[in-house]
Amino acid sequence: MEILRTIADMKAWSQRVRSTGRSLGLVPTMGALHEGHLSLVQRSLAGSDLTVVSIFVNPKQFGPGEDLGTYPANWEADRDLLEPLGVDAVFLPTRDLMYPKGFQTTVTVEGITNHLCGKSRPGFFQGVTTVVLKLFHIVQPHTAYFGEKDRQQLHVIRRMVEDLNLDVEIVGCPIVRDADGLAKSSRNQYLSAGQRDTALSLNRALEMARERIEAGEADAALLRREIESVLAPYADARIDYVSVCDADTFEELEVIHDKALVALAVFVGKARLIDNCLIERVPCKEPC
Ligand SMILES: Nc1ncnc2c1ncn2[C@@H]1O[C@H](COP(=O)(O)OP(=O)(O)OP(=O)(O)O)[C@@H](O)[C@H]1O
Ligand SMILES: CC(C)(CO)[C@@H](O)C(=O)[O-]
Ligand code: BAL
C-alpha cells in the first residue's frame, strides 16, 4: 500500500495508473476508520481496478465551537485496517498542503444546502464541496464512494459533479450499523456507555417513523412530533433537527405522498450524531 503525503506524489501516482487504462476509485474520509468506511472501501475494491483512500480532517467544514480540535485520529489503526483489504494507496495530506497561505477559493452548492445540516452547520457544505473538488482534482478518480449516512452530503456532491461537469461517477453506499442498530460513526467514540444507550433512540425513532409511514400516516408534522417524543425521555439527548422531508430537495413536507426522507441530528453529550432513512410506501395492489 503506497502512502502518499504530497499533492505532487498523489497526482503523479494517479496519472501513472490512468495512463495504463486502469480505473481508479476514491474513498474520501476523515480517518478514525470503522466498518462504515470499510464498506465503501470494499465497494471500491470490487468496482474499480485500484483504490485510493484519502484521510484528511478538513478544517474548512468545522464551525467555531465544533470538535475540530478533538476529532478522533489514529493513523496506525487506520493503516492496519486498510492494508489487509488490498487498498492500493492512501492519500494523507497536511492542512498546510491542502490550504497553503493565500488560499481564497470556496465552492458553493446552493439550494439543497439551505436545509438540515447546511442550516445547522453554516459553512459546512462549502467546506465539504471545496475539499472534495480538490480531492477529485488531485486524485483524479473515475469513481468516488460516499455513505448514505451523510445523505445530504451525497446529494450535494452529486449536484456539484453535475453542475461543474466533472468526470467522476458518484456511488452512494448503504448505512452500516452496529448489531443494536446504532449507525457506525467515528464520533461514537465520544459516547459513554450510558450515552450509547441514549444514541440507540435515533434508530428506534427512525424505525417508528418507518412503521407509521408504511402503515399510511401522511401527516409529516405529526410524525416530527412523534419522533421528538421518542427522543424526549433522554435527558442527555439534545435535538439539533428532526426532519421529514422531500428526499431530493430536502424541503420539509406537510403531506407524505409515496416517499419521504426522515433525517435526524442529535447531540448526545459532545457527539453530534446523524442518521436517516428513506421511506417509500409500497402502493396497494388491492383496494386498501
Ligand atoms: N455508518 C456508515 N455507513 C456507511 N457509510 C458511512 C458510515 N459512516 C460514515 N460513512 C461514510 O464514510 C465517509 C467518510 O465519513 P467520515 O470520515 O466523516 O466518517 P463518520 O463516521 O461519518 O464521521 P463522523 O463521526 O464525523 O460522522 C462518508 O462518505 C460517510 O458517509
Ligand atoms: C467527504 C468528507 C471526507 C470531506 O471532508 C467528509 O465530509 C466525510 O468524511 O464525510
Ligand atoms: N461525515 C461528516 C463529516 C463531518 O461531520 O464533518
Image (cartoon, helix red, strand yellow):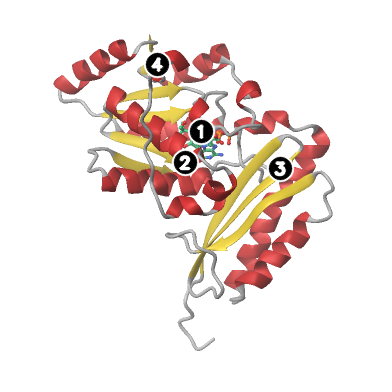
Residue of label 4: 100
Residue of label 2: 125
| Residue at the spot 36% in from the left edge and 23% down from the top edge | 52
Given residues 43 and 242, the one toward you in this image is: 242
For badge 4, the amino acid type reads Pro
Residue 94 visible at all: no
- State which tag comes first along the sequence, 3 or 4: 4
Q: Is mark 1 within 8 Å of ligand 3?
A: yes
User: Could you tell me if the residues under marks 2 and 1 are in contact, i.e. CB atoms within 8 Å?
Assistant: yes
Q: Residue furthest bottom?
A: 287
| Residue at the spot 47% in from the left edge and 19% down from the top edge | 82
- State which tag comes first along the sequence, 4 or 1: 1
How many residues crowd around disc 3 within 10 Å: few (fewer than 14), some, or many (20 or more)?
some
For badge 2, the amino acid type reads Phe
Q: If the picture is divided into quarters, which one holds ligand 3? A: top right
Tell me where residue 31 appears, x and y as whole percent. 53, 23
How many residues crowd around disc 4 within 10 Å: few (fewer than 14), some, or many (20 or more)?
few
Of discs 1 and 3, which sits in the foreground? 1
C-alpha distance separating marks 1 and 3: 18 Å
Quarter residue 130 falls in: top left
C-alpha distance separating marks 2 and 3: 19 Å
Residue of label 1: 61
For badge 1, the amino acid type reads Gln
Quarter residue 263 falls in: bottom right
- State which tag comes first along the sequence, 2 or 3: 2
